[in-house]
Amino acid sequence: MANLKLTDVEKTYGGAVNVLNHIDLDIKTGELIVFVGPSGCGKSTLLRMIAGLEKITSGTLEIDGQVVNDVPPSQRGIAMVFQSYALYPHMTVRENMSFALKIAKKPQDEIDASVERAAKMLQLDEYLDRLPKALSGGQRQRVAIGRSIVRDPKVYLFDEPLSNLDAALRVATRIEIAQLKEKMPDSTMIYVTHDQVEAMTLATRIVVLANKGIAQVGSPLELYERPNSEFVAQFIGSPAMNLLPGEVVGTGPQTTVRMQRGGTAVSDYPTKDSDMGLKVNVGVRPEDMVETTGDAIFEGKVDFIEALGEVTLLYFEKQDNQAAVIGKLAGIHTDVRGKSVRLAAAPAKVHLFANGVSLLYR
């Protein structure tokens, strides 16, 4: 449907409060891009600038090669789905979905065809004559999405569309959005969320925002397996990646690290001779740690457990004012609380960071 290009985009309020800096991003036709990041990082502000609801302070936004900085929102070919649904309560589903087309003075037969097509796609056929109050939260969100589809926009924008739904509805509606994208492979979508599961399951690429800019852009697996910084490593994945201090004692295609709290770690991250003695943080995801009786990356006393059925989360006692180390073992391990457990990880799963930056990206 459309290519988007943001070049050196910045946003400042009142000439003093800077929110976003040097945003450079290319979004290709057919991609589903997800913006994630901590609260206040500018995710929704960036989405609203693309929509035209916020002015761009500097830089350019292009849609299919045309600079649209000063183009009104209604003329950008963009449809936005809000977390609050924003449905007209006195209108039926059919009337809500057709309202924008009527305002645009489209022929009635064209309006009816567009509404029927969108309703069928979203499985709303039997609800077309109901008022929003007679629908569930998930159905209302589908109506809001349908209202966007009938306009046949160049770009779809989703601003945390599932945040008002309960856990079960969120899962069901997430799957529906993923299936909708499959039915519309050429549509370009940008989706803002704070939910990592939504980001990992829906995105073609994820844009991680932090410190007023872009921390990293990549496919979900890229960011999970090869984060470029400690921030991204701990932001992507739940529970967060463990970071354990150590010192490089062996260099080469594989790197050996002596752990500050005892034991050693071996990583597939390559290092050079000059890295000998380098202070690093060893990153290991809880799910990549396994019990061992041999050499361990980490050994500690289990302070608390969460038995979730398919997995058990082990929370180890804190030491040296460091964040709690978490292990994630398959199955039920209710007998380990209060005991000392040794954990190891395969070299391919061991990440190395120096000064907050991955050694792969320095």
Image (cartoon, rainbow, N blue to C red):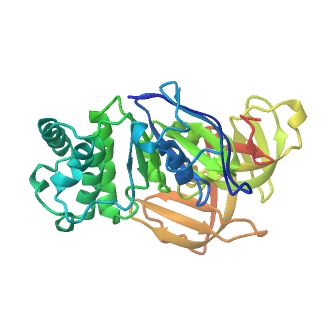
* Residue at left offset 51%, top offset 49%: 48
As rendered, which of 76 and 320 lies closer to the eye? 76
Q: Quadrant of residue 104?
A: top left
Task: Answer with left or right where residue 192 lies relative to residue 122.
Answer: right
Q: Position of residue 168 (x, y in %)?
A: 30, 62
Q: How many labels sit on residues? A: 0
Q: Quadrant of the N terminus?
A: top left
- Write down the quadrant of residue 102 in the picture: top left
x%, y% of residue 300? 68, 65
Quadrant where the C terminus is found in the figure: top right
Give 327 or 37, whichever is nearer the viewer: 37
Q: Position of residue 146 (x, y in %)?
A: 25, 47
Left or right for 290, reference 270:
left
Q: Is residue 115 above or below residue 235?
A: above
Image x and y of residue 334, in percent: 47, 71
Q: Is residue 22 at all visible to an observer of this figure?
A: yes
Query: Relative to residue 96, is residue 232 drawn left or right?
Result: right
Q: At 56% across and 38% down in the image, what residue appears?
A: 69
Above or below for 289 versus 254: below
Residue 287 in sight from this viewpoint = no
The residue sitting at 70% across, 70% down in the picture is: 318
Q: Nearer the viewer, residue 198 or 148?
A: 148
